[in-house]
């Protein structure tokens, strides 16, 4: 019986070693990208993130926003420097959906996911509310893994006309835990990736 189990145990050990190696490579890459972003936001910036705002797609179509090393760093209304995009909130919108796509590989051991933050502005582009940690939950679909959340606009954000989607430097210290059914794998938050938004 022991002889029968030995090959299976050996294969399991090899798989675990391979996954651990992928996670080490991923974490080293995450550290490199995070340091690159922190260096960029440490520079003095006077750019106004609300100077040019995106008009979102109508209906159920997502509007895609890409954060990468060339995304301009702006000074947010709170004084924080960050990569940011301004999006117009359509008239009558009652909720904002947001989805961030993970990237880096085919397994959770390789993935890094961007954790977007939000600042809501009124018609004069004055700050109403800063949400550095909006409610986002892990979502695994046929299109891949990511973070998804809904922000209701009908209460304290009813006067919001613009939203700044940005990458808070402090988010880079966090991660989302993914339970596979066997064990929990942390997927770290990175500074770069695609965010999708739409309004209802």
Image (cartoon, helix red, strand yellow):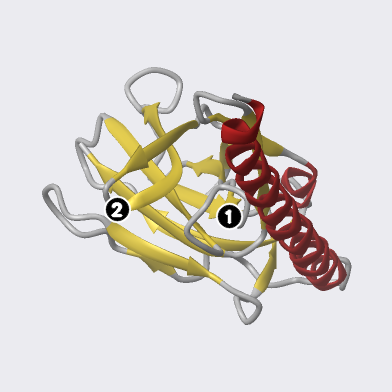
Residue displayed at 68% across by 67% down = 74
Residue under label 2: 143
Asked if residue 8 can be seen in this view, the reply is yes
Say which of 56 and 68 sits in front: 68
Residue displayed at 88% across by 66% down = 42
Alpha-carbon distance for marks 1 and 2?
Answer: 14 Å
Residue displayed at 35% across by 28% down = 153
Q: Taking 68 as reference, is 31 left or right?
A: right
Q: Position of residue 106 (x, y in %)?
A: 47, 59
Residue under label 1: 111
The quarter of the displayed image where residue 151 is located: top left
Quadrant including the N terminus:
top right
Count of numbered circles on the image: 2
Say which of 111 and 19 sits in front: 19
Asked if residue 129 can be seen in this view, the reply is no
Instruction: Give the secondary structure at mark 2.
Output: loop
Q: Position of residue 109 (x, y in %)?
A: 62, 50
Relative to 106, residue 118 above or below = above
């Amino acid at each position: 019986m022991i002889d029968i189990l030995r090959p299976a145990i050996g294969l399991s050990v090899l798989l675990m070693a391979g996954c651990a190696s992928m996670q080490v490579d991923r974490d080293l890459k995450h550290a490199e990208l995070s340091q690159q972003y922190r260096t960029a936001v440490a520079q003095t910036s006077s750019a106004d993130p609300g100077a040019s705002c995106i008009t979102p797609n109508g209906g159920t179509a997502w509007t895609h926003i890409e954060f990468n090393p060339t995304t301009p760093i702006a000074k947010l209304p709170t004084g924080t420097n960050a990569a940011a995009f301004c999006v117009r909130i359509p008239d009558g919108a009652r909720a904002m959906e947001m989805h961030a796509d993970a990237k880096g590989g085919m397994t959770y051991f390789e993935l890094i996911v961007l954790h977007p933050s939000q600042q809501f502005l009124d018609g004069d582009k004055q700050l109403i509310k800063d949400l550095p940690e909006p409610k986002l939950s892990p979502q695994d679909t046929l299109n891949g893994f990511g973070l998804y959340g809904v922000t209701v606009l009908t209460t304290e954000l009813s006067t919001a006309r613009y939203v700044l989607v940005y990458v808070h430097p402090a988010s880079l210290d966090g991660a989302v835990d993914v339970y596979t059914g066997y064990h929990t794998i942390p997927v770290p938050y990175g500074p770069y990736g695609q965010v999708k938004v739409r309004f209802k």
